[in-house]
Image: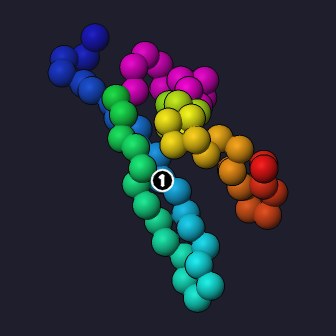
Amino acid sequence: MRGNVVSFQSVLIYIQLIFSSEELLIDFQELLGEHSGKNMAAVVWSTLEKYSIENKVCQSDICIS
């Protein structure tokens, strides 16, 4: 352990509007354990479930719906 090191992860959503896009912070959680993709994905997934938006995820032009 390296002293008082605490890691956090933020989760943002991007909303595409007609004439602009917006960025909104929807969650900010302590990241427990390793900084692995698995742990970070678990934080993101729990946030998506918390807001019931896990079926509304898009990456570029590919969307899960």
Q: Is residue 14 above or below residue 37?
A: below
In this view, 31 is above or below 57: above
Residue ranking furthest to the front: 52
Residue sitting nearer the eye, 8 or 4: 8
SS state under label 1: strand
Confirm whether the magenta stretch covers residue 38: yes
Q: Residue drawn at (81%, 57%), measured in percent from left and top?
A: 62
Q: Which residue corresponds to the image point at 52% horizontal and 56% vertical from the top-left? A: 13
Residue 60 spot, x, y in % from top left: 74, 62
Note whether 13 is above or below 43 in the view shown: below
Q: Is residue 59 left or right of residue 16?
A: right
Badge 1: residue crowd in 10 Å (few <14, some 14–19, many ≥20): some
Left or right of residue 26: residue 36: right
Give the residue type at disc 1. Leu
Measuring 48% from the left and 26% from the top, which residue is drawn there?
A: 35
Magenta segment includes 16: no
Q: Which residue in the rendered view is the most extreme toward the bottom?
A: 19
Quadrant of residue 55 within the rendered picture = top right
Query: Taking 9 as reference, is 4 above or below it?
Result: above
Identify the residue shown where x is 39% and y is 20%.
Answer: 32
Residue numbers of the magenta segment: 31-42
Left or right relative to 65: residue 57: left
Farthest right residue in view: 62
Is residue 29 visible to the viewer in this orientation of the structure? yes
Residue placed most toward the observer, 38 or 14: 14
Residue assigned mark 1: 12
Figure quadrant of the N terminus:
top left
Viewer can see residue 40: no
Q: How many marks?
A: 1
- x%, y% of residue 11? 46, 46
Viewer-proximal residue among 56 and 60: 56
Image location of residue 48, percent across then percent down: 56, 40
